[in-house]
Image (tube, helix red, strand yellow):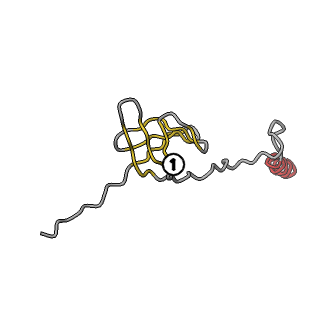
Amino acid sequence: MRVLLIILMLAAGYAFALEDPTRPSGFSASAPQSEPAREFSLASIFIGNNRRLAVIDGETRREGQAFEGVRIRRIYPDRVELVDQGRVRVLRLEPLPQVRSSQ
């Protein structure tokens, strides 16, 4: 009986050491690290009759344009939607500082 128990314990320890033969070589069980989200600076938005423009990182961009692996999905009066690595990101215009009258 004792011998059977020792054999089962050794077999269980050996089973944990087995590797999956279908796992690709070099596979890591940890989640893949994605690139950190890039920061973009939205300075201005211009909306006219037939065009929508936004100044992002000092460059004028139009709706539908792609740059640095990012595509401008839609330009609204107060924000810009970007598609970055399949995810939608929203850039918002910072409110202008309020000017007080000295009178």
- Counting labels gives 1
| Residue at 44% across, 50% down | 42
Q: Residue 59's x, y, as percent? A: 51, 48
Question: Is residue 28 shown left or right of residue 40?
Answer: right
Q: Residue 45's x, y, as percent? A: 39, 44
In the rendered image, the vertical position of residue 78 relative to residue 98, given as above or below: above
Check disc 1: other Cα within 10 Å, few if <14, some if 14-19, many if 20+: few
* Kind of element beneath mark 1: strand
Hey, which residue is sitting farthest top in the picture?
A: 50
Quarter of the image where the C terminus is located: bottom left
Q: Quadrant of residue 102?
A: bottom left
Which amino acid, mark 1?
Glu
Pointer 1 residue: 59
Hey, which residue is sitting farthest bottom in the picture?
A: 102
Q: Which of 17 and 59 is in front in this view?
A: 59
| Residue at 36% across, 37% down | 47
| Residue at 37% across, 50% down | 93
Q: Nearer the viewer, residue 24 or 71?
A: 71
| Residue at 48% across, 48% down | 56
Question: Is residue 31 shown left or right of residue 8?
Answer: left
Hey, which residue is sitting farthest front in the picture?
A: 49
Q: Residue 33's x, y, as percent? A: 65, 50
